[in-house]
Structure formats: C-alpha cells, structure tokens
Amino acid sequence: MMRPTITVNGKETPLAPAAPHTTALDFLRERGLTGTKEGCAEGECGACSVLVARPGVERPTDWVAVNACLVPAAALDGQEVITSEGLATVGAAGTAPALHPVQEEMAVRGGSQCGYCTPGFVCSMAAEYYRPDRCEHSAAEGDTAHSASEADAEHGPNGFDLHALSGNLCRCTGYRPIRDAAYAVGAPTDADPLAQRRDQAPPVAVATAYTQDDKAFVRKNTLAETLRLLRERPDAVVVAGSTDWGVEVNIRSRRADCVIAVDRLPELRELRIGSDRIEIGAALSLTEIERRLDGRVPLLAELFPQFASRLIRNGATLGGNLGTGSPIGDSPPVLLALEASLLLADADGEREVPLADYFTGYRQSVRRPGELIRAVRIPLPQAPVTGFHKIAKRRFDDISSVAAAFALDIEDGVVRTARIGLGGVAATPIRALATEAVLEGRPWSPETVEAAARVLRGEGTPMDDHRASSLYRSAMLGQSLKKLYAQHTGDAQTTEAVSS
C-alpha cells in the first residue's frame, strides 16, 4: 500500500500528518483552502461542500457534492476533490483566474452578502451544473430566472433541480438571488476541463491502511478481506458515507481505535433487477440508487426527496441507515412496507433475514459481531397502492417525528394485502400488524379506513420528546392512513366527513 494521498484541485496532496479521524473539511482548511467552511459540523448547512469524482450513472464519472465536515479525509485516499477555489480556470501568466460560470452567476445576480455560505452553495450548484441529464443546450437568452418556461417552483427552465441546494443554508443573502443564479446557468462547454473529466474513468478505489497514534483507518480491496479484518477487530467502527459517524466525531468527540471503510467495496455496490426481486448493494449511495432505479420502485422514489438533503443522499447508504438501528431512520418504514430482507455476511458465509425480524431493541439488531449488511432484497411484484408520509417540523432536511409507509394490493375494491411500516413510534421501526389485519379482506372504503385509522393510532408506544408529543404522534398515524385513501381515490371530502 502506498502512502495515502488525495488529489485536491489537480494537485496530489499527502494525507499525513492528519490524524485518522481528521475530517476532509479540516484537512483542506489546514492546507489553506479556507473557502470550505464549518457551519454546523453535522451536515445540515452545506458551508463545507466540495466536489468528489465518483462512478457515474450516465457517464463514466459524476461530480458529486458531499459534506466535507462528515467525510474522513482518509476515506478520500486516491480520490479527486475539487473545492470552490479549484472551480476557477487559471488564466495566463500574470492574469487573474476566470470565474466558473456558477461563480459568475452568483456574483452578477447578488447571490452573496457576507459570503460565508457562498463557497458551499457554489460547489453544490456546480455538481448540479455538471449533472449529465440536466440539460442538453444552453439556457435561453436573457434573464431565465423568471422565464415562463419554468416547469415548476423547484425546477428551472435550464433543468436545474433546486433540491441540489436543499442541504445549503444562507442566513443573510436570501434565497431568491441564489435561485436566480441557479436558473441562469447554461450547459458546460466542450472546453470545460471538469466537463471533459466526466468522460474518463473515475479513480479506482485503493486499499488504505493509515495509522497514527494507535488509531487506524483501513479500507480493503474485497469484501472477503474486510470480513476477515472485522472478525479480528469486532470493535471496529464500519463506515460508508460517514453521515452518522461524522456527527459522532464532530459533536461528541468520539474517536475509534479502528475505522473500516466499506463504501468502495465492489461487492456492496451492485444493483440487480431480476424477475422476482431487486437486490440493492448496501454501500450504494441513496442518490445512486435513486438514479439507477429511475422510479422503478415508486415507494422508494417517494422516500428519496424527503430523506435529508441531496448532499447527505450523495453519501448516505441503506446499509448505514439500517446498520445504526435508529427508530427514526427514514428507510426502515419503507423497506418494511416493501417486505424487504437483508443479506448479512461474515467470514463464514451469508444469511438472509427478513427486515421485520431484524430489529430487536433500541439500536439493536440480530446482526452478530463480525457481520455486515451486504445487500437489501425487495421482492417482486410490488403492491400497486403505495405512499410514504413523513411528519417533521421542516419540509426537507429534517428528522422525522413520525414516518409511515404503506403498500396495499387492492383488487375489485377489496384490500387483498396490506403492509404498513412505521418509524418514530417505538424503540424500533415496526410493522403495523394489527392495522394490516383490519384492512385485509375488507372493502377499500371510508368506513374501513376510519376503522383501521383508529387501530393505527394505537400501534407502537410513542413517547413525548422535543420533536412531538405521544398524542400528536398517535394522531398523525391515523391521519396518515386517511391521507393515503384521499390520495388514492381523490375523495378527500369523503375522508374528511368520516374523520369528523
């Protein structure tokens, strides 16, 4: 194994003397790249965002924006990183660098006041700017920000998806000029070096063994090697996108003797679609899953936009979300409704466990020491009537107070099967088995929905905390089923009459 290095703005940069727990944010700032800022240290503000070259969906390479405050610098060994300083084009000798098109639009449209958040916005905007399927030609002449051709309030006439900025916060500029800048950018030119870079293969994941002061960060080449190491070091912390562990490091000052990275293992990055099931690798990011499935699983497609922010989804994985065992994770209710199972692997082999049997207590599961989640299996065919309802204080980028996922098979007006997954109402994510029993075999009608909603309000053991009261959580469960009925039938008035 060679000495760990990161290619930053085209320059190979040694990782040493950074400690294994050092975040990419601190690594970059210590090397004078102070455009990358720390605002929240937990992945909510986006002031730290940078671009990383990752395997692409439509082209060999995608420029992906991530939270540098969460990613360990050692996890970027052998990778390519672009900061806000690296977006500008270096001019001829004696001339100033030329602004990147995203930077130019932010400047001319007043998208920056104090400037603290601006570099993070610029990097997130640049990732969307280089998204291959965003647009095929330059934006129309003139001020496109208020063009009548806007498809909706969250997409510009140039194809810019404002959700690309959902993880970036600005406290003084105001979002309208930032949106104007986003909607004004055109398409990358053929001479753009970062656009050209997309047509080349991404960096190959390298094995990493970085140790300092008895602390180690390790990445193996294969799953088999990783599982053998995990058997030797059952105390090790396993990370993929590090969107959870990064918060522990920053906010709670946790330090692990050994961190094992699994995010680039090929065996955990496969997505297979068969005739009877879909198998999703545990280390694929949520963004990769979303774009590769392209709506094939409607319930997952409904989940993704509500799961944190694009910056987080660019790193977060299903394996990580399930591995933490959190009772308020967004993916477990959906996967429970889809009757998913998990493939758990260790050095001796692999076993399949239904997700409904996986959780055993608060942040506890049947996963044994030395085991990893290799993949998530979703059986086919899927139920045709689905819905995911997340109740939170903010519309996006927030932790849920209650989450409910529904998957119903309705034939000739009768509920044949019902699967309901719940989060935030017990020590673990749960199936609403009593409610499912009330629905199955009965007409899909306001009367059935009202009866089932009463039962659903009693599922779980919701508690009072700073996010919501137990009474509120229970009430929202019942309303969630009524909302599903109204969405499916378009009969909101009937549902309201029943509830009153």
Image: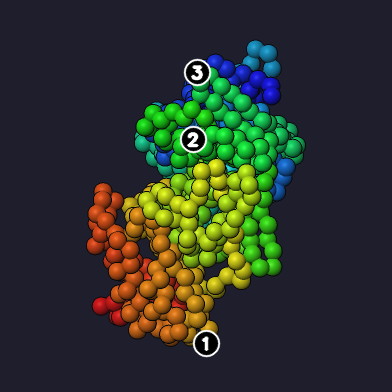
| Label pair 3/2, CB-CB below 8 angstroms | no
| Label pair 1/3, CB-CB below 8 angstroms | no
Query: Which quadrant holds residue 444?
Result: bottom left
Foreground residue, 278 or 100? 278
Q: Quadrant of the C terminus?
A: bottom left
Query: Which quadrant holds residue 8?
Result: top right
- Residue 162 drawn at (x, y percent): 50, 48
- Residue 312 drawn at (x, y percent): 49, 43
Foreground residue, 421 or 165? 421
Q: Residue 213, which numbered label?
A: 3
Q: Residue at x 58, y 70 (%)?
A: 382
Q: Residue at x 41, y 77 (%)?
A: 437
Q: Which residue is mark 1?
A: 412
Asked which secondary structure carries label 3, the reply is: loop
| Distance of label 2 from label 1 (alpha carbons) | 54 Å
Q: Which residue is mark 2?
A: 235
- Residue 230 drawn at (x, y percent): 57, 37
Q: Select label 3 or label 2 by which is in front.
A: 2
Q: Specify whether residue 451 is in view.
A: yes
Query: Could you classify mark 1 by the number of other residues whose Cα lies within 10 Å: few (under 14), some (14-19), or many (20 or more)?
Result: few
| Label pair 2/1, CB-CB below 8 angstroms | no
Asked which secondary structure carries label 2, the reply is: loop
